[in-house]
Amino acid sequence: MVREVWRDSADNEAASAVFHFVQQLIDRYRDNRPVMPLVVLQAADADVPATVDARVEQIVRRIHHANQLRRVPLKLLDGRGETPYEAALDMVRTLTEKPWETRSSSQYKPFVFPRSRLLGAIEQATADVVREPDPGGSPDDRDERILEQLSTLRWRVSRRGPRNWLGAFRESVRPETFLGAVVIAVLGVLLGEIGWVPTTLVAVGAVLGLAVVRLVTTSAPPLLWLRRASRWFATTSSLAAAGTGYPSDGWSRFSPSGSWRVIRVRAAVVAGRVADAAAGDEQSRQFHLELRVQALLEDLRNNYRPHALDWRRGKRTVPPVVFLPTACQSNGGIQLINAINNVRSRRSEVDPLLLLASLPAAEILRHTPPLPAEPLPTHTGAARARYDNWISHLSIGQSPTAAATLAWVLRLPLSTEQLTHEHAHAQLVTTRVRRTWVWWVMSRTTVACVLVGALLATFLVSSRLADRYCHGPLTDVNTDSVKLVGPDGGPKECIGVSTTTRVRFAPGNELSLDGSGKGVTFDRIERAVARENAAIMPGDDYVTVIYAGPFTATSPEGTRKALEELTGVYLYQHHTNKLRFSVKLKVLTANGGQDMLQQIPAVKKIIEVARKDRTVVGVVGLGRDTTDSPRATGLLQKAGLPVVDTTNSGGYLAKDYSNYFGIAATDEEQADALALVAGQVAGQAAGKSAKPRARVLSRLLGNNDKDRYTVEQRKVGSAMLKKAGFKLSDPLEYSLGRRNSADLDEPVQKICEADPATDALYFAGRVEDVNNLMGRLAQRCAGKPITVFTGDDLTKARFDESTDLAQDVTLYHTALAPMSRGRADGFYPESHQTLEGLLPAGGELPRLPASKPYQDGLFASGQSVISYSATSALYDAASHGDKVNSAAETWANLYAVNLQSMPTGTITFRGFIPYEAQSGHGLDVVEITYPDGRIHSRIICGRPAGAHKVTPAGCPVG
């Protein structure tokens, strides 16, 4: 509902008519921006009594009072000055220098008058110079002094008034006083501390610094020529004739010096005319007044300018209104009306100013009378003199002083009858001008709330991004890796793909390689991969391989598998890029989390990266068999990405997914190899009892371990023992205790106390539980011969002198990397040299054994060799024909890979049929005994990769 702010009765018909007319002009401004006139009220009859003139004046004052609370910008003027010129000029200055009446309750912030302030600075500088004792000299000298004074004022009006504490403080810290005193004091101290040479240098620097400070504080403000007021001053056509030496086209935002010349020339001209006006020159007075009015109107137009960043035109929906209760010749009112009319007529520009004035009946509103003609010279050069005179008069000569009417003045003659006839029943009402929606949208409060809201939202979004993504700053968020809660609610893990150097999965991980690789840490390997990637230059042909492994664990030792596999991937990447093959190799790392339990989110991120980066040709790794393995492989198959697996021995994957290519022997292949030994062990045991006994011991499946490997091993282990001739007793299971350690006390006790005795045990568990098992057997089954078979590759197990082993226990396991059967002897010294290059300058690795280097702890687990082979197979398919192949082409080319002279034999997938079991992988059968208190490990049989099957005769049991 619109708020009513003023109500009164009309005293007469004229008051009601004028009131409604003026209110219509004000209220319609929002809709169609009507042209604002200079409204002059005057009694129609010239011989009316003073009471009638008072009624006319009262109309102006009543309309002024009615609009005071409406948010309409108002100004009631009363000229003061000894002459009409000074009084009119005082009113113009009041409009530009004093606050308007509705400043605190306006629709928008108060008006600003930069053009008027610029003219005010010129006036102040001129007045200061004029008040000086006459030093003599030419007018040019006076202009120079005025310009110097303007520079001192920094082209701004100084605030003059009684000296206060702020002014005193400013004086005390002036560069030439305060800073100078500080510099002198400091130099005095330094002279006694550092000697005269350094002190001199400091003094020179201080003097230069003070000079710069003085220059900045006393010269014109920087970028002054670019300000809107300066541009108007340098380009307005009203001053073009006065500054013919430097016309308006000399100003350019890209030419400070040229623009300054124009501004200074025009400032000198204006200052000269202001000085002449102060001396009483009528022509200069008219020029000065009209220039001031022009600056006022230009400032008002700019305050209503459309397309401004602050949307000011949409906020100010009512015009500024100026009231002259009594305009006459003596108080400068008529001169002001004439000046506004002249400027508007000369420039043909529409400004928003609405003026309402009352004129005494005895006054005659007419143009400013033409100035008296000055005598013109008749001597030689009179034409030039006439031209110069014409130029000097042109600025005001364009004003329509000789016209018959005042074009912009709307005279409203009011008859005596209208002014005296009572009209009390007519109610005059004004209502509050509403602020527009633009004001609410672009108000300080709204902007502040938006900024606060934006900052808060930015903080919340940034916090959420930082909490969700491994690298989550708002301006550089990387969505290819996310933070997920670890197993059993453990610490968050960074899961996904590292596509930026800001995301690293092993930062600060000081887990070191074994054997002669001691000193090469996980952190160094990860950095080395990043350096190899960075060495690939734009324009190089390259393919991208993603290695997916378990980069995080509860302890650094738990990341050893990822360390050794990434080492193999890096070794092949460095080998390939060092040889400058036509297609380079880029490696991205993907973290599947502890024990690969987060491989589904990791695989989804791999697929996202592959969609964005068409150079991605496949995945290496995923070397742990979990319940998520089938789904992960299926997702990659659907995305068109082949998988060259490292140590996952699940034979079902190749049968179900055509994109799966395994380097490791499958569970079935390992079981078949162990069956060659188990049959001989069963035959030996049969001589002691009617039927040899065997049991299968496996992990108890939990809710979070996603252990499919145990299920597969239990199935193939049971089938292998039956095939070998053992009679199976009830299977046993063990659980995981604190810190994921195997709780084997109860199952081992059942094994050792069984009657009849257990001859063989198939351990369908994980390699990390083998040490615990052997220790329990040594304690509980002493004196009882028992043979243990395990399907997991124990080459990565850490058997040392502290491991308890029973002399009557024999352990058989398979090794997935038969390095003794390969023919890549150069691989080991080259790898050792490459890794040594990762140490700090001058660092050296322990020497690698010359004989059987693969037995060194650096390579013994076979993890790095297997990942090296997997990476080489995928790269060979991706770079087939010495060109970059797509992921689909790589998938097809994998069936034709045939890499000979590899560390484990021949890496080939030839003969593999999609959705059929894969075979021909290399493996060794290893026997571990403890006959004399020392661990003895020997390879009893095996085959290289890509070779024939192992026969029973090839696997003799000792």
Image: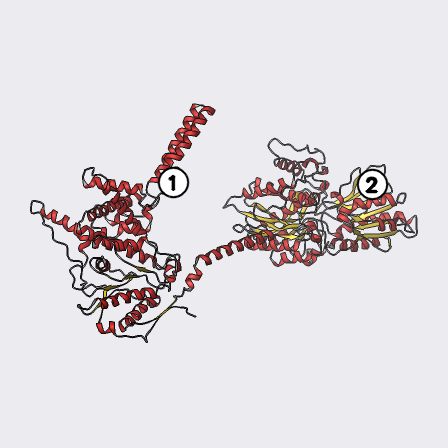
**Disc 1 crowd, CA 10 A, few/some/many (<14, 14-19, 20+):** few
Task: Please indicate, yes or no, whether residue 361 appears anywhere in the rendered image.
Answer: yes
Query: Is residue 804 placed above or below 880 in the rendered structure?
Result: above
Query: Callout 2, which amino acid?
Result: Asp
Q: In which quarter of the image is the N terminus?
A: bottom left
Query: Is residue 178 placed above or below 763 in the rendered structure?
Result: above
Residue toward you, 619 or 376: 376
x%, y% of residue 350? 28, 61
Q: Which mark is residue 168?
A: 1
Task: Please indicate, yes or no, whether residue 623 appears anywhere in the rendered image.
Answer: no
**Disc 2 crowd, CA 10 A, few/some/many (<14, 14-19, 20+):** many
x%, y% of residue 425? 32, 76
Examine the image and state in which quarter residue 604 appears: bottom right
Between circles 1 and 2, the one closer to the viewer is 1
Marker count (numbered): 2
Mark 2, residue position: 804
x%, y% of residue 871? 63, 46
Residue toward you, 359 or 813: 359
Element assignment for label 2: loop
Q: Which mark is residue 689?
A: none
Element assignment for label 1: helix
Q: Which of marks 1 and 2 is nearer the N terminus?
A: 1
Left or right: 618 as drawn, with respect to 958: left
Query: Callout 1, which amino acid?
Result: Ala
Residue toward you, 612 or 209: 209
* Alpha carbon separation for disc pair 1 and 2: 90 Å
Query: Is residue 677 placed above or below 91 in the rendered structure?
Result: above
Left or right: 617 as drawn, with respect to 939: left
Left or right: 483 as drawn, with respect to 8: right
Q: In which quarter of the image is the C terminus?
A: top right
Q: Residue furthest left?
A: 379
